[in-house]
């Protein structure tokens, strides 16, 4: 290869490298399972999320990061339901295996919640097992996050925590779909029309605090509302959510490790 050809080759290689580094993080939670994981000692584990992309800096440097313990002084208990006005409606949804978790993504208009006068549209729900938030240092079996976004790009997440017990009716309605996801390597599975009103809350008391998204880009100024009443799901329902993900850190037989960003 001539000198000029070599120069051109390296210029192109450098350009491609640059382009691959500056790909912007989306405003939604990032969906590429390769880019980060929950390996506590890994290069792309929680402790290093903030260094993977400049846009993810808040994961390391943020001052209002989630998850936290719900007895933290940042958290207040809110008892007037008036501040959580849900106006959800049924819409078509897709189950997406994001590699690190299972997400139910509404394709159409699934309605919204109104928090202190701001309307947040419901975008998706996903599950964490064990729970991300803790109560007095203890994690529970499962936590669902219902992620909402306002037209100006602010997030509001409603969280519901579960311990092992009686079946959860919403998860029961998804059993077949989750089983087909578990047995498939496809990323997306059609879930049909899903009514978000069937995700049971059953409490008028909430924990409320201002935190962040719990996965990159860890966006701050996220309004958290966590239902105070702990609900139940069966061991099998929790197991199915974990198995469907095919992620080693979600493996049902592995002990959970402390999740520290
Ligand atoms: Zn989450």
Image (spheres, grey):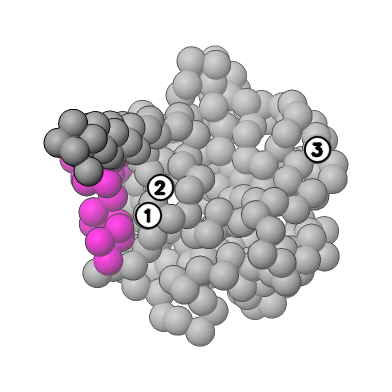
Quadrant containing the N terminus in the rendered view = top left
Residue of label 2: 215
**Residue 160 falls left or right of residue 107:** left
Labels 1, 2: front one = 1
Count neighbours of disc 3 (C-alpha within 10 A) and say few if under 14, some if 14 to 19, many if 20 or more.
some
From the viewer's perspective, is 36 left or right of 126? Answer: left
Residue 45 bears which disc, if any?
none
Write down the residue under mark 3: 92
Which numbered disc flags the more N-terminal residue, 1 or 2? 1
Question: CA–CA distance between discs 1 and 2?
Answer: 9 Å
Q: On residue 36, which mark appears?
A: 1
The boundaries of the magenta stretch are: 42-65
Which residue of the protein is positioned furthest toward the front in this rendering? 2
* Mark 1 and mark 2 residues within 8 Å of each other at the beta carbon: yes
What crowding class fits label 1: few (fewer than 14 Cα within 10 Å), some (14-19), or many (20 or more)? many
Image quadrant of residue 106? top right
Tag 2, which secondary structure?
loop
Please state the horizontal and vertical placement of residue 257, each as a whole percent of the image: 34, 72
Q: Is residue 57 rendered magenta in the image?
A: yes
For marks 1 and 3, the one nearer the N-term is 1
The reply to whether callout 1 and callout 3 are in contact (CB within 8 Å) is: no
């Amino acid at each position: 290869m001539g000198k000029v050809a070599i120069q051109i080759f390296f210029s192109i290689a450098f350009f491609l490298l640059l382009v691959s580094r500056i790909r912007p993080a989306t405003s939604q939670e990032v969906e590429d399972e390769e880019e980060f994981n929950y390996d506590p000692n890994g290069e792309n584990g929680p402790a290093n999320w903030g260094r993977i992309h400049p846009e993810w800096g808040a994961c390391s440097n943020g001052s209002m990061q989630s998850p936290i313990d719900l007895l933290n002084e940042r958290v207040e208990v809110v008892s007037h339901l008036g501040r959580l006005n849900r106006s959800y409606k049924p819409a078509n949804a897709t189950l997406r295996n994001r590699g690190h978790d299972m997400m139910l993504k509404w394709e159409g208009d699934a309605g919204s919640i109104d928090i202190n006068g701001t309307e947040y549209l419901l975008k998706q729900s996903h599950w964490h097992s064990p729970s991300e938030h803790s109560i007095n240092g203890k994690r529970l079996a499962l936590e669902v996050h219902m992620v909402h976004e306002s037209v100006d790009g602010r997030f509001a997440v409603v969280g519901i925590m579960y311990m092992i017990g009686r079946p959860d009716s919403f998860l029961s309605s998804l059993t077949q779909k989750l089983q087909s996801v578990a047995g498939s390597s496809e990323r997306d599975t059609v879930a049909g029309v899903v009514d978000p009103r069937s995700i049971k809350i059953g409490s008028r008391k909430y924990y409320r605090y201002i935190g962040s998204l719990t996965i990159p880009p860890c966006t701050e100024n996220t309004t958290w509302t966590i239902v105070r009443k702990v609900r139940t799901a069966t061991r099998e329902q929790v197991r199915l959510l974990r198995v469907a993900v095919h992620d080693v850190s979600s493996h049902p037989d592995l002990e959970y490790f402390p999740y520290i960003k």
